[in-house]
Structure formats: structure tokens, C-alpha cells
Image: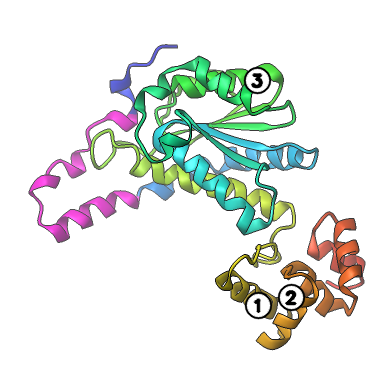
Amino acid sequence: MSTDLSRLETEQINQNTASLDSLPTTALVETLHRENHTIAAAVDEALPSIAEVVDEITSRFKKGGRLFYIGAGTSGRLGVLDASECPPTFSVAPDLVQGVIAGGREALVSSIEGAEDSKEDGARDLKSIGVQPVDTVIGIASSGRTPYVIGALDYARTIGAYAVSVVNVSKAELDEHCDCTIKAVTGPEPISGSTRLKAGTAQKMILNMITNSIMIKLGKVYGNLMIDVRPTNSKLKERAVRIVMAATGTDAEQGRILLEQTGWKPKNAIFVHKTGRSAQEAEALLVKADGHLREALRAAGLE
């Protein structure tokens, strides 16, 4: 399916911002920000598809699957960003969620616009990192027609992986190349064609929602506390202490002692405090509960 780019919502001229260059600064930033208020509503429409994708990826993770984001330009960078934040936030392996960008690592800091035009490169890049049938590939393309992403999703489907697209247009060429399309139609950009603005913001919201939801379902969150945070610096250690305090009602000194006893694992520290079990017992019982603190507490006669 060929695409007339001029008909894509992301390529239309935004009449609400037609006089940007003549506005005083206060009116300029107000006008730009007014457009931001439309983004969440666009994402609202995508929630059923996001939920479907979350459930499928969670199921695949439990079978040893991984998640690969792939895109070009801003879309690719957002995928790499979301992937890179999962290990410190949720203490998952660095290869569980990975980001792939057209043009490679150089494209993270430099514009390599021509890299998006090759379907073959998209397929080759996925093949080179060993994508498997149990894995998920999420192709991100605001226009819904980036050749690099099409090639990647076609390859993913060929080997039996779950293929998903995230787009910002109502009629996306990627529909024909994936198992599920997440559409957040953000409309004309404040600066015509600059999809790093509204479209990019919607993409970041969606990717955050996907990985956060999956990690919650995998037991990485207790209530709304980030109990699997990896305290690799002083700021994160203080955050871990506050998490233990919030979950147990203990004070900072006792929270720190619990964390030191459990190797600075907030989830384990909370379990030890609530059950009176040893750090070793906590580790074993949490493993038995597949890392779900609430389930482990329930098995111990609590919650």
C-alpha cells in the first residue's frame, strides 16, 4: 500500500499555530503548550490495544521472551530510552527490553535520516541480534509507513515473533505488517511535520505505559511502590529506604538495616519486616512466588 504523505494527519498544517513566529514569548509558549493538552486524549483511544499488547508480552516474558523496540529518528530514540530505563527501575536483565534504532548508536546523537528508508536494514538489524519466536517486536513510526520498521516487523512475523506497531495516524501502512497496531492520532503538529512534538510525546507515554504495566504484572511493584529498584547510587539508596518505610511503617534507621540485611533489595526487606523471616527465607519464598511480594505474603499467612 503506497502512502500519500500529504494526507497523513501528522503532515497537515496546524491552523491553531499558524502565527507562531509573530507571537510574543508568553503567547508563544502558551500556544505550543495548548497543543500538548490534546495528546492524552489521543492516547485514550489506544488504551484497549495497549492492554492487549501488555497481556501478550507479559505472557511471553513468562516463557523467556524479550521485548525489542525498533524505529528511526525520534521514534527509535524513544524506544532506546524506554529500554535503557528498565534495568535500574525494575532490576531486570539489560537484554530483557532492548532498543534498536536505524543507523545504529551514532543515530542516537546525530541525525541519520536516510537510514529509515531500507526495509532490508530493518530485517537485518533484528536478525543480527537474534530475535526469537517467543519475543516481541514493537515498531514505532509516527507516519505508520517507515520502510525500516516495515522490514523489521515483516521479519519478526516471518519467524513467529509477536509484531506490534505504534503509530500516530488513522490509516497506517504498518497495519498490514503486524499483529496489533496501537494508534494515537495526535493530529497536525504545532510546527508542521515535526513529529518529535505531539507524536513523540504520545509515543513516550505509550512506551512507558507498556513497560510499566508489564513490570507491575510481573510483581515489580507493590501497591504503587517501586520495590525492585536497583539502588546503585546514594539517591537510589535513599529512595529504597523511603520505599521500605512506606510499605512497613518503620523508620529510616530500621529501613536501612533491613535493606543491608537483604542485599539492598526493597522487596526482600519488606517481606522480612512483615513476616519476621530471615533474609534467606525471604529470598526463597519470593522466588517460589515468581517475585510477587503480595503472593509471597499471602502464602505466609498475611495480606
Q: Amino acid at mark 3?
A: Arg
Q: CA distance from mark 3 to mark 2?
A: 44 Å
Residue in front for this viewpoint, 270 or 114: 114
**Residue 157, disc:** 3
What residue is rendered at 33% in x and 32% in y? 10
Using the image as rendered, state which of residue 233 and residue 228 is in the foreground.
233
What secondary structure is the magenta-colored segment mainly? helix
Between marks 1 and 3 in the image, the one whose residue lies nearer the viewer = 1
Q: How many marks?
A: 3
Q: Earlier in the sequence, mark 2 or mark 1?
A: 1
SS category of the residue bearing label 1: helix
Q: Which residues are magenta?
A: 9-37
Q: Residues within 10 Å of mark 3 (few under 14, many from 20)?
A: some
Q: Say which residue appears at 53% left-offset and 18% top-offset.
A: 151
Q: Residues within 10 Å of mark 1 (few under 14, many from 20)?
A: many
Tag 2 residue? 259
Q: CA distance from mark 2 to mark 1?
A: 7 Å
On the picture, is 255 further left or further right than 290? Answer: left
Q: Find residue 141 and name its label.
A: none
Q: Helix, strand or loop at disc 2?
A: helix
Residue ID for mark 1: 241
Mark 1 vs mark 3: which is more N-terminal? 3
Q: Are marks 2 and 1 in contact (CB under 8 Å)?
A: yes
x and y, in percent, of residue 219 in the image = 74, 57
Verify whether residue 210 appears in magenta. no
